[in-house]
Image (cartoon, coloured by chain):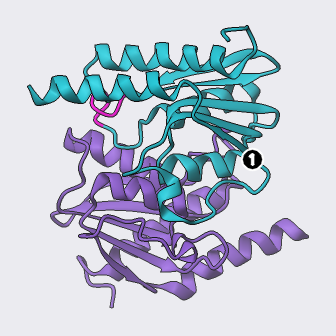
Chain colours: A cyan, B purple
Amino acid sequence: MMEKGSDEYYMRMALAESARAAERDEVPVGAVVVAGGTIIARAHNLTETLNDPTAHAEMQAITAAASFLGGKYLTNCTLYVTVEPCVMCAGALAWSQVTALVYGSPDPKKGYTTTGAAILHPKTVVRSGVLARECSEMMKKFFRKKRK
Amino acid sequence: MMEKGSDEYYMRMALAESARAAERDEVPVGAVVVAGGTIIARAHNLTETLNDPTAHAEMQAITAAASFLGGKYLTNCTLYVTVEPCVMCAGALAWSQVTALVYGSPDPKKGYTTTGAAILHPKTVVRSGVLARECSEMMKKFFRKKRK
């Protein structure tokens, strides 16, 4: 289940990033980028800390991974993110031509799939629902606390 | 026509930014953000220079403007960009809740309107076709040179 190299294993790493966001009172979304079994980028949402609406976990993970690889394309990379990407992040993933996208919980409000449009690169493989319950619980816990 | 404060005036500033991109051999797209008649951010595409697929002119202009304003929202701001934004940039503009988007030439391949989805914030006003010929010619000239 938590075998190294499995989707669950890397999603746990993304969840750890989302916990770092929660600690900063940021909407708890975390992401990692994996290439050849190695995590080459880790990021969490920083929109409040940076006063930047573009500072989603995925955007920073893409920027960091591309910088690490020294090129614009995330060829042979998988991006793991705890929550379904929004349109902005899906559009960025399309430009990156990422090989695979794996996300945890769906986002029925802001997720890119709600548009019905083909936003990702046609070759990008998508797997969803990985540790969905934990990823969703991280968000729910955050918003429950906010509402108190 | 080139009256200060007109759409054409600010689009000329965005065109000047696109020329800076061309000088660096970047796809020549430029953007400025205007608030209360003042340009608070200027940016041009830097995807090649930064090895970053997210480094579009609009993304950087949004980040810079939000930083200048000290908040995530581009309330009472207009973003001028020489070419129709892609899905990523339109998604970012949605998060920013920018008051108005003004673009020059359409992008029939990668423009956000090609998706048919309602990506921008519902309150964002859009004006297009401002100095469209100049904006389009900047792109055509670049790609003609590339193909030589």
Q: Is residue B52 above or below residue A41?
A: below
Answer left or right for B122 relative to A117: left
Which residue is under mark 1? A124
Quadrant in the picture for the N terminus of chain B = bottom left
Instruction: Please say whether residue A28 is visible from this viewpoint.
Output: no
| Residue A47: in magenta span | yes
- At 24% from the left and 54% from the top, the residue drawn is B74
Can see residue B51?
yes
Q: Is residue A103 above or below residue B26?
A: above
Q: Where is residue A69 drawn, in percent x and y?
A: 75, 27
- Please, what is the three-letter code of the amino acid marked with disc 1? Thr
Which residue is most to the right?
Answer: B148
The residue drawn where x is 60% and y is 76% is B107
Image x and y of residue B42, in percent: 40, 54
Chain letter of the residue carrying label 1? A
| Residues in magenta, as a range | A46-51
Which of B81/A130 is in front?
Answer: A130
Please give the name of the residue rendered at 65% of the width and 61% of the height, measured from the top-left corner: B22
